[in-house]
Image (spheres, helix red, strand yellow):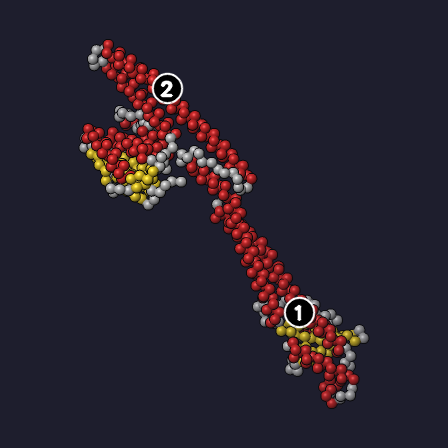
Amino acid sequence: MRTRLLPLLIVLMAGVLLALGFPLAMSLAAREQQRVVVDRIDDTARFAALAQFVTAGPTAVTGAKGDKGGEGNERLNTLSSELARYHDLYGIRAGVFFRDGLRMAKAPADWRLPRGGNGAEAFDEALAGRRSHDPPQVWPWQRGRLTVASPVVRDGDVVAVVVTDSPTGRMRSRILHGWLVIAGGECAAMLLAVGAAFRLTGWVLRPVRILDTATHDIATGRMQSRVAAASGPPELRRLARSFNEMADNVEEVLEQQRAFVADASHQLRNPLSALLLRIELLGLELPDGHEEIASVRTEGKRLARVLDDLLDLALAEHTAADLRLTDIAELAADRVDAWLPVAGREEVGLAYTGPPAITGWADPVALSSALDAVVDNALKFTPQGSHVEVSARAEGETIALTVADGGPGLTEDELARIGDRFWRSNRHQNVSGSGLGLSISRALLTAGGATIAYAPNEPRGLCVTITVPRSKPQ
């Protein structure tokens, strides 16, 4: 869930940051250019004030060097020197031009009035009596120049235009530097947002993960698992409390069920024992070989076996596992040796194959009981002359203990039901048993973190695999 939630939050936060960053970058560029434009307007206004009193026409300007005594020529010389000093100091081209485009004064001498693009627009705007106030924006990747023009007004008429043609390198550098600062701030904000997103998703999803773990624990038999409802959103804390209440109720119901089965099994043993004793006494009064009394004895013993298995099942589901580091290979070989007399009586081969020693975490008593039930079933259903093989092998972090027989095996539908309480295949109803042996085995193994699985054995028979963890379960 986190992998789906995080990209959504990151994309949303990135969109917000970009939506704020682009206008800020454009505002920064506009502010830098506006500052340059205002500075140039001030400069053109100063030059316009000097040019306002220059009365010499173009002809007089041409012969200005030969006429030092005229007041107009003196003012023109002052204007020319100011323009030259301005260009030398700032590197900005500047000039004053009459309405027809002829120069009054300019610096440098070889500069000509721009006749196209922004320069022409600024000149025409100044001829209309307006100062340049909103030239097109110059971006860092553009190498153009910034032209600003102001009118020279005398007696209410525009007689000339002051034009400055500025390089934009420094301005573009400042804009780019500001953009880099903004980009750095955006990146830092994005990193903070990603960190906040991780914390937020962790805070929201932590109760969900805890709830999932507790649900898995309960599903695998650890009924004491509960959820700590101390963190996360209020809705999830409320869900955790509801889950704990449900788990308490389920555990209580299961405990009542186990107690009922155990009590019923225990209470029925004494009347059944008395009944079997009376049947035996009654059998003494009947002639030998009486069929009905033999059938009653058989059913009575079967009922006693079912009650014993029910009590064992209730105890297996209620008793906690005593996990120890156990030599699984040694335990399997020992159980095979214990069942060899039974295998010899049934004329069935029984042997252990595998490594001499392999350790895993298990309850030795529970694992021995479960293995006994599986081997007992294998010997029951394996015909004479066939073979039952018990083997152990390491598979990564687990140990697989396998019992493979040569019996008739089970169909796919029967494999899906094997291990259910009191279930027995219709083909095996004549074989003694209560149908609880494998259920008891599963309960014993589950308490210790082990599992049991069933599969067909090739070429025939059933293969039962008990999986034991190699490391200590949590």
Judge depth for marks 2 and 1 and give the one in front.
Answer: 2
- Residue 469, percent across and down? 34, 41
Q: Nearer the viewer, residue 111 or 261?
A: 261
Three-letter code for the amino acid on which mark 2 is drawn = Gln
Q: Is residue 422 above or below residue 322?
A: above
Classify residue 36 as left or right of residue 457: right
Three-letter code for the amino acid on which mark 1 is drawn = Val
In this view, the residue farthest toward the bottom is: 66
Q: Nearer the viewer, residue 29 or 299?
A: 299
Which image quarter is the C terminus in?
top left
- Can see residue 60? yes
Q: Is residue 288 above or below residue 185?
A: above
- Residue placed under numbered mark 1 in the picture: 36
- Residue 122, percent across and down? 69, 71
Residue drawn at point x = 29 percent, y = 31 percent: 373
Residue 62 — which label? Answer: none
Classify residue 117 as left or right of residue 392: right
Upstream in the sequence, badge 2 or badge 1?
Answer: 1
Residue 267 — which label? Answer: 2
Residue drawn at point x = 60 percent, y = 56 percent: 20
Q: Secondary structure at mark 1?
A: helix
* Mark pair 2, 1: CA separation: 103 Å
- Residue 268, percent across and down? 35, 19
Classify residue 16 as left or right of residue 422: right
Q: Which corner quadrant of the image does residue 73 belong to?
A: bottom right
Q: Which corner quadrant of the image does residue 397 belong to?
A: top left
| Label 2 Cα neighbours within 10 Å, binned few <14 / some 14-19 / many ≥20 | few
Q: Is residue 72 above or below residue 459?
A: below
- Can see residue 56? no
